[in-house]
Amino acid sequence: MIQKSKSTIITITIHVLTWAVFGLIYFFQPRSWSITVPYQLWIKQCIILGVLIIAFYINSLVLVPKLVLKNRTGLYFLIIACIVGAILLLNIYADEFLNIRRLMDAAFHKMGPPKHHKGGRDHSWDFALLAMSALVLGISTSITTIQKWQKDKQVHQDMEQERISSELSFLKAQINPHFFFNTLNNIYALTHVDADVSRKAIHQLSRMMRYVLYDTQNATTMLSQEIAFIKDYISLMELRLTDVVKIDFSSPAALRDMAIAPMIFLPFVENAFKHGVSASQPSYINITISQNDTVVELNVVNTIIKEQNTNLEEGNGIGLNNTRRRLDLLYPGKYNLLINESTMENAYLVHLTLNLA
């Protein structure tokens, strides 16, 4: 509200200063004639200037919005022609009513022989007023049209930003339940094997939930926090794995902390644990997070286990699909995602390059 008031005050001030400068220019020419200008001329000048100001705002506030911006240009130009004609007629009647022609001829006569045809009209004045009227109305139309275009553009940008924000919130809301659903499934399996380990897992999950529910509410989180979350997730997943599964994780030793979208890495890591490990078959997951200045890379390589036990969320792939969409919205032109399934090596590769600048 305060910002809007300041903007209104600035706009009014600009209009007042603009008309003040225009008025000084408008009144300058008679003062350059080196004669005693009759006060009646100044009265007429004030009247014409006032009419020009009124015409400017009628055009700006009424005619342009109601006619030009609604594609009724024929009627608009007819009304503008009538307004300009009315200003010219007013100028003629003001000259006659105030006897300005006679007074000006007398003033010039005192300075020497008259240079104008006495009793006749100086049509150069009419042409100058015509040009000035067209200039004022043209500026009015241009300013109003540009302001409307800028306003429409800003509204479109605001609507687009709101749409993107709503879509991101929806995608993030889907990712979080997806993560908790799979994790709770894993802890449920642990309760049948080792109660102590399951209690440890629940405690670790509560710490992770605190991060998800409170620390990721903003649009971004810190890279160090995101990496710590991935470490906690891997540690939690390792609780249910056997010795036949090899897990390798590495992250930058000297990390340059930067802002990053929260939980942007999780779906790729989660997918590796969901489809790349087995309780009986030898399998592995290699996860590497590296950083080069503002560029962060995630590499996830895991074995492909063809036969997995069915679960309640079999094969819907909601996490990866949402992450692709989040990357499109949050980092357009700033990321590269390569996903490759090698049947010969029985390996699944994810390589994400993300520029956080």
Image (cartoon, rainbow, N blue to C red):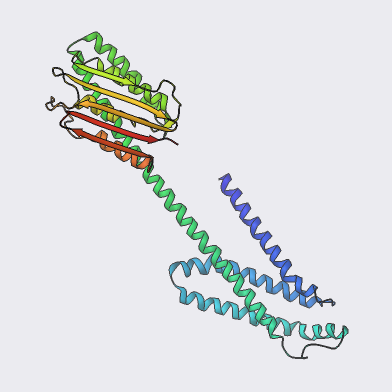
Q: Is residue 40 left or right of residue 224?
A: right
> In the figure, residue 24 lies in which quadrant?
bottom right
Q: Is residue 254 visible?
A: yes
Question: Which residue is at a point 67% across and 60% down the rendered structure image?
Answer: 16
Q: Which residue lies most toward the left here?
A: 307
Residue 205 at x, y percent in the picture: 31, 19
Residue 190 lies, with reference to residue 268, above or below; the image says above
180 in relation to 330, above or below:
above
Q: Quadrant of residue 125?
A: bottom right
Give the x, y percent position of residue 37: 82, 77
Image quarter in which the N terminus is found: top right
Q: Nearer the viewer, residue 206 or 316?
A: 316
Q: Give coordinates of residue 179: x percent, y percent.
A: 27, 27
> Which residue is more in the foreground, 47 or 134?
134
- Quadrant position of the C terminus in the picture: top left
Q: Residue at x 46, y 74 (%)?
A: 73
**Residue nearest the observer in this picture, 48 or 290:** 290
Name the image quarter holding residue 14.
bottom right
Inspect this view and state whether residue 210 appears.
Answer: no
Q: How many marks?
A: 0
Residue 163, how many percent across, how many down? 37, 46
* Residue at position x 61%, y 48% in the image: 6
Report whether 172 appears left or right of 86: left
Q: Residue at x 27, y 32 (%)?
A: 350
Question: From what the image shows, is residue 96 above or below residue 205?
Answer: below
